[in-house]
Amino acid sequence: MDMSLSSSAFADHAPIPYVYTCEGRDVSPPLQWSAPPAGTRSLALVVDDPDAPDPAAPKMTWVHWVLYNLPASAGHLPEAAGDAELPAGTLAGLNDWRRSGYGGPCPPVGEHRYFFKLYALDTRFPDLHRPTKAALERAMQGHVLGQAQLVGTYRRQR
């Protein structure tokens, strides 16, 4: 069975509900996963938007959330997973607002895609001191056993 990632709040390639965006409560959606490969010692989660700032002319990938050292046995993250709700041992990196934690979709124009990427790793990392996505990706090189992805979309309501 292949590793999978899903949410009870939205289907793959479907709109992300308002509550999980900057226009709503700006809290993380619930996430569930299954079947990390044998030998998985930890998981990492990166949420990013490759359509920034405008899907018609993207110039960068905007990072919304970076987590690492999620226990391989965790299986899920609850809605509104702030520091207190994260599984024991989980550490957060920096998003592109230069803060740790989840920052919801907030596209300036058009409909953007948001990639929730879960990585199964053969190691646990020491404290990387709030790494950026790029720093975490460098640390993960040679350690990725598997990956699952969930994509949501969002267009501002106002």
Image: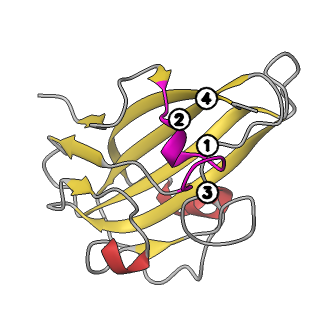
Residue 130 place in picture, x, y as percent:
60, 77
Label 2 Cα neighbours within 10 Å, binned few <14 / some 14-19 / many ≥20: many
Q: Nearer the viewer, mark 2 or mark 4?
A: 4
Which residue is the site of mark 3? 103
| Res 118 → quadrant | top left
Which mark sits nearer the N-terminus, 2 or 4? 2
What is the magenta range? 15-26
Which residue is the site of mark 4? 154
Q: Is residue 107 left or right of residue 151?
A: right
- The secondary structure type at the circle numbered 3 is loop
Amino acid type, label 3: Gly
How far is disc 4 from disc 1 in space, using C-alphas?
A: 12 Å
How far is disc 2 from disc 3 in space, using C-alphas?
A: 13 Å
Q: Nearer the viewer, residue 96 or 102?
A: 102
Which mark sits nearer the N-terminus, 3 or 1? 1
Residues at badges 1 and 2 in contact (C-beta under 8 Å)?
yes
| Res 1 → quadrant | top left
Q: Is residue 46 left or right of residue 155?
A: left
How far is disc 3 from disc 1 in space, using C-alphas?
A: 10 Å
- The secondary structure type at the circle numbered 4 is strand
The residue lying furthest to the front in this view is 158
Residue 63 place in picture, x, y as percent:
66, 50
Q: Is residue 33 left or right of residue 112?
A: left
Amino acid type, label 4: Tyr
- The secondary structure type at the circle numbered 1 is strand
